[in-house]
Image (cartoon, coloured by chain):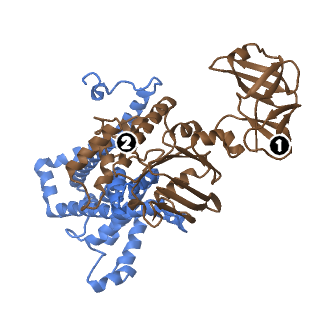
Chain colours: A brown, B blue
Amino acid sequence: MALKIENISKTFDATPVLRDISLFTEDGEFLALLGPSGSGKTTLLRIIAGLEQPDAGAVRFRDKDLLAKPVRERRIGLVFQHYALFRHMTAAQNIAFGMNAKPRKLRPSRREIRDKVAELLSLVQLDGLGGRYPSQLSGGQRQRVALARALAIEPDLLLLDEPFGALDAKVRRELRRWLRDLHERTGLTTIFVTHDQEEALELADRVALLREGALEQMGTPEEVYHEPASAFVFDFLGDSVSFPCEIKGGVAVIAGAGVPIIGPHPNDGAATAYTRPNGFDVSPGDGPGLAARVRSVLLAGPDARVDCVLDGGGAIEMRLPLDVARKLAPRDRVTVTPRTVRVW
Amino acid sequence: MTAANPRLRRFVEPSALGGFWPALGFTLCYLSFFVLLPLAALALRPWELGASGVWRVLSAPRTVSALELSFGSAFIAACINIVFGTIAAWSLVRYEFPGKRILDALVDLPFALPTAVVGIALTAIYAPHGIMGELLTPFGIRAAYTPMGVIIALIFVGFPFVVRSIQPVLEDLDPEVEEAAATLGAARWRTLTHVVFPAITPAILTGFALAFARAVGEYGSVIFIAGNIPQISEIAPLLIVIRLDEFDYAGAAAIGMAMLSISFVLLFVLNALQAGILRRGAPH
């Protein structure tokens, strides 16, 4: 176990930001801290880096107490969301900063620093751009300078705060793939913070979901996606549709139709059922299930988006196969039934 | 690079929105009437005395020592101000403490006070029997009626320029940059010298230039505390006034011209220095 976080709590001005969080990372693992804004994920990252002190709890790295060490002795590389590059230094000077900041006895020679900077520039694919100032680099390039600067101190742990937050969609996807490759090559234990579930599920070995400062669920992307521990996790990891239902003998009864429940089975009684937009069957005319009228059919895309207005009030936005959707037209009367639901 | 050289295209209207020619025309007229014309008059007047006459005025020991005192003490005062002005700006930007807003308002006081009032107040304090004067006397230090008194007055009038130049830049400086330096292993002192100071150096230079320029021309607050002993504590602006009182207008203009030339060269050097720094770390 590389990093172990035990019962961390933190309050800012009487507002609890982190509530009793415990989690760990394995050596060489790529862990995502995922949550909506205000869930405390950046604060947790800053506590690990040493930029904040928790009110309670412990942070251990390879069984050593991290909290007792000041920031600069922790050897934790941190890449800030807005990079925090030194504007008056070139990319190369930025990268060399950590090595130059070492006490004289431990400082590498000038030649070693120069070689290491060249090596890192090439690692982050910025060969030949070492002489540029941050203002002369694009967002994606600045991001990689910040990463190289953090890697230059040969950290035991790498922390990334919303590493792709300030970049446009295309650059994001490219950098994401590249970062995953880089992680595989360096094998560095890495924790990154994100509010983008797609990013977390695609990149991370494991995902820790935070909600209002508490850990909601932790597991591999497959586990959290297919076995969400709560309605919050289910909703956060993808689009979700919910409607009222009645639980009877292990089946959810929705407008007269019995729908099988996956996941844990709740007790009988009224409840809320959840499913994904692509988890519906639609049949024309009336029958057991939710009576609805088609509002719009959008066929542009790999699957079709069909909006229906429910007779009982409310609307449902579904994703249906194109061949099914082509048979529907606005104002058609249909019956909608989820194939399976989850109930918490 | 020839066609795209901005130096060769300096009259090209930079924006489709227009307004360039009226704006430039107005600026040039305004500058001509209020700055260039009086300065030209100042530059022409001394030559009534002939080149040798101008030289005689400027090389007189009394003139030389007055110029030395004015520029020397302005320089020392500006140096002292950038040290303590930076610390004051830092405290006002980075820390929260009771009375901070009052302190912040106090910084501007030297701007607002009539300089003669300042001069009288400082003289009362630093005179041998004043509050500060009594503290200094046992050490054999005399502040009032010496060049030291001149420096004290110039520190007072220059201080707000330094604080107000640095403050906004410090406010803009993201604390994350310092945090980044700390995570990279830099000790606090190294972060200050290698990260914070380079970022605020242009602002410090601006503050220095403003405080220095203000101090060179300062008159009211200095003449009371200086004692105005010729060749010891007599500043150049006072010498100009003395010459005017003697109806020696050309002599006064000669000293004025000398001050103008020296100030212009110094400010030009400071500007060039600053431009050089800004070009390196061009902020976005």
- From the image, which quarter does the N terminus of chain B lie in? top left
Residue closest to the eye, B28 or A217:
A217
Residue A156 seen by the camera = yes
Q: Which chain carries label 2?
A: A
Q: Residue at x 37, y 42 (%)?
A: A145
Q: Mark 2 points at which residue?
A: A145
Disc 2 on helix, strand or loop? helix
State the residue in front, B153 or B168: B168
N-term mark: 2 or 1: 2
Please state if B170 lies on the left or on the right of B51 as rendered: right
Q: Quadrant of residue B146?
A: bottom left
Amino acid of disc 2: Val
Disc 2 and disc 1: Cα gap in Å? 51 Å
Packing grade of label 2 (10 A; few <14, some 14-19, many >=20) is many
Instruction: Say which quadrant the C terminus of chain B sits in.
Output: top left
Q: Percent x, y for residue A272?
A: 80, 41
Left or right of A254: which side holds B265? Answer: left
Q: Which chain does the numbered disc 1 sit on?
A: A
Q: Quick check: can you spot residue B205?
A: no
Tell me where residue A206 appears, x and y as whole percent.
54, 45
Disc 1 designates what residue?
A: A271
The residue at 45%/38% (across/down) is A180
